[in-house]
Image (tube, rainbow, N blue to C red):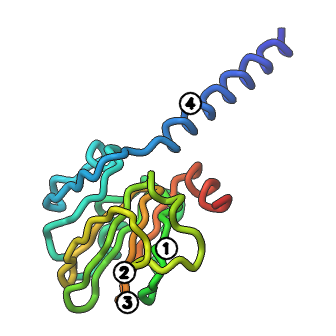
Amino acid sequence: MLKSSKTLFFVVLVLLIFVYTQYYLKFNTSYRIIQAQLDKIDESVLYEKYPIVVADRIVKPEVLLQTLFKYKYITSSIENRKGSINPYLVTHKYTVLYNTMHDIDVNIIAPQYRGEFKTNVDFYRTQTQYVTIKLKKQQIIILPAFWLYHITSPHTVIILNDPFSYFISKIY
């Protein structure tokens, strides 16, 4: 009896992991971009897996970790990045781009085109469709997993992971 209970538990656990993996690896293929005030963004908006441009100005991006993203993610980090001619692939649950300087252009690319970008490919020499967003000073954009972005200016990045996305980000 005890052995069959352990087997049943293991089968259910594997099934749950499989279902969550299928959900996590699924992405939207359209170029829908959500623009909203910070107080209108909640989990249901985040789970749509579309980029979100926050209309509000954010003075300290760390505040997001205590408000919008509080208690939801096991790891978070804040990095300052230089711009690059190569696009960045979002391998985390969410990546928040924060503009600390003058207005910058952020080019975002849908996940279905990520295969067209191998390492060290100049962004401007590809034929991939992308959308350019003008990010004002102290404004953020939230990108879900598997989207690509391209910025040539310095910017701040907040990386958020839940347990599963942390594991997946280590694989990619």
Q: Residue at x 26, y 49 (%)?
A: 42
Q: Which numbered mark, 4 or 1, is in the foreground of this view?
A: 4
Residue labelled with disc 1:
77
- The x and y percentages for residue 53 are 22, 64
What is the secondary structure assignment of the residue under circle 4? helix
Q: Are the residues flagged by discs 2 and 3 in contact, CB closer than 8 Å?
A: no
Q: Are the residues flagged by discs 2 and 1 in contact, CB closer than 8 Å?
A: no
What amino acid is at disc 3?
Answer: Pro
Residue labelled with disc 2:
151
* Real-space Cα separation, disc 2 to disc 3, in angstroms: 8 Å
Q: Residue at x 52, y 67 (%)?
A: 117
Q: Quadrant of the N terminus?
A: top right
- The x and y percentages for residue 68 are 30, 59
Q: Which numbered mark, 4 or 2, is in the foreground of this view?
A: 2
Q: In the displayed structure, would residue 25 be above or below residue 129?
A: above
What is the secondary structure assignment of the residue under circle 3? loop
